[in-house]
Image (cartoon, grey):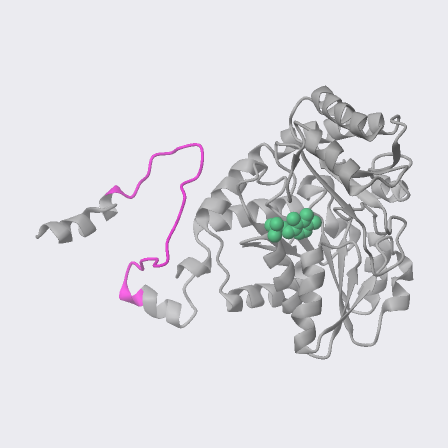
Amino acid sequence: MKEQTRIIRNLWPERERTPATTINPPLFKGSTVLFDSYEDMARAARREYSGITYGTDRLPTQRQLEEAIRDLEGGAVTRVFQSGIAAIQTVLMAFSKSGDHILVCDNAYAPGQRFCRQVLQKFNIDFTLIPPSVGADIEEYIRANTVLILLESPGSITFEIQDVRAITGVARQRDIVTVLDATWATPLYLKPFELGVDVSIHSVTKYISGYSDVLAGTVTTNERCSAVFRKFYKQMEIYTPAEECYLALRGLQSLATRLRQHEQSALFIAEWLRTVPLVDDVLHPALPSHPEHHLWKRDFRGSSGLFAFTFRQDYSETQLAAFINSLELFRLGYSWGGYKSLLTAAKIVRATPSRYAGKTIVRLSIGLEDASDLMHDLERGFAFLR
Ligand SMILES: *Cc1c(COP(=O)(O)O)cnc(C)c1O
């Protein structure tokens, strides 16, 4: 046999396909998946084959992440996506058609709202933004052609909490699919299916992966929505790189431990901020001062490390820049849920009435640095505002 043929033939020979048992699962990567025989390939063509047929049929690394999340969520089916926003977009498409109407909570992830406006509307799917602290009053917004309600609780910038139980109660009676983006709470601190939700979404990019080096998302559905969703996912031929699934699975192993620390440090900073004279509201669901604290207590098992605050006074851009640029530990950047503390600041613009309209919201993602060092960093920064 010639050299080039030996190179190809000898890579991972069949007789050596019993890999060593490492703690972490092997990373499966590929397009082609080999069949053992012509008969198996023929079975696959007739859709009678139970094995994996192709890379987009979800290789074992992806399937392991899906199963881990499905188990935590207590759902019927989970699929992984290349990002959280891809997960949101696909769910919106899977459960709607031309002529339908969708309700979207006004605090939901902005690119998801933009997708409704700029893509779904092209296909004659209408949408209405609803107030972020909606509950049983969802009734007022429902039309004869409403098919889906997209919620995010708490919202990841302004932290309003929806009365999810009341909403799913109303939706169920009218056969409307309820979708909840539960990224803030992770699958550990909120169980959407216990609240009657049909579809639960997570941006794995945040706490689940945990190191700011992964983009991925998951969708988990209950039994009722599983067939439609499974079929749509297959038709879209979505594929999530094995490296991302591997890293997400690795992050998942330490999620509970990291989350406890994020929670504890965030509460420490939030409670301290309440004593700072130039701070007005501290927007943290676990604080009794939060307007929907009772809902957080009823539905959630804990709080994560993302929250926000407002100032008593309206500072100029120059003053804000001086404060923010002076910080050493809090860095500026989008996304959250990693080990490094991050900050964003923006004026809130909303289509529906909001208690924070026009206010500058400073959002903190509390990382895994020592909480007292983080407090001192902010304390030093506040000096620039006095
Ligand atoms: C970040 C985020 C998303 C989108 O996730 P990506 O993986 O960055 O696309 C969706 N929902 C919420 C609440 C988020 O914070």
The residues colored magenta run: 16-39
The reply, left or right, for residue 359 in relation to residue 211 is right
Q: Nearer the viewer, residue 345 or 340?
A: 345
Q: Nearer the viewer, residue 190 or 370?
A: 370
Q: Nearer the viewer, residue 273 or 159?
A: 273
Q: Is residue 294 magenta?
A: no
Q: Residue at x 46, y 56 (%)?
A: 58
Q: Position of residue 294 (x, y in %)?
A: 90, 41
Q: Position of residue 278 (x, y in %)?
A: 88, 31
| Quarter of the figure with residue 328 | top right
Q: Position of residue 308 (x, y in %)?
A: 79, 39
Q: Is residue 29 magenta?
A: yes
Q: Residue at x 38, y 71 (%)?
A: 45
Q: Residue at x 73, y 31 (%)?
A: 263
Q: Taking 62 as reference, is 268 above or below it?
A: above
Q: Position of residue 37 (x, y in %)?
A: 28, 62
Q: Is residue 121 at all visible to an observer of this figure?
A: yes
Q: Taking 73 as reference, is 273 above or below it?
A: above
| Quarter of the figure with residue 97 | bottom right
Count the marks: 0
- Looking at this view, name the residue that lies furthest to the left: 1
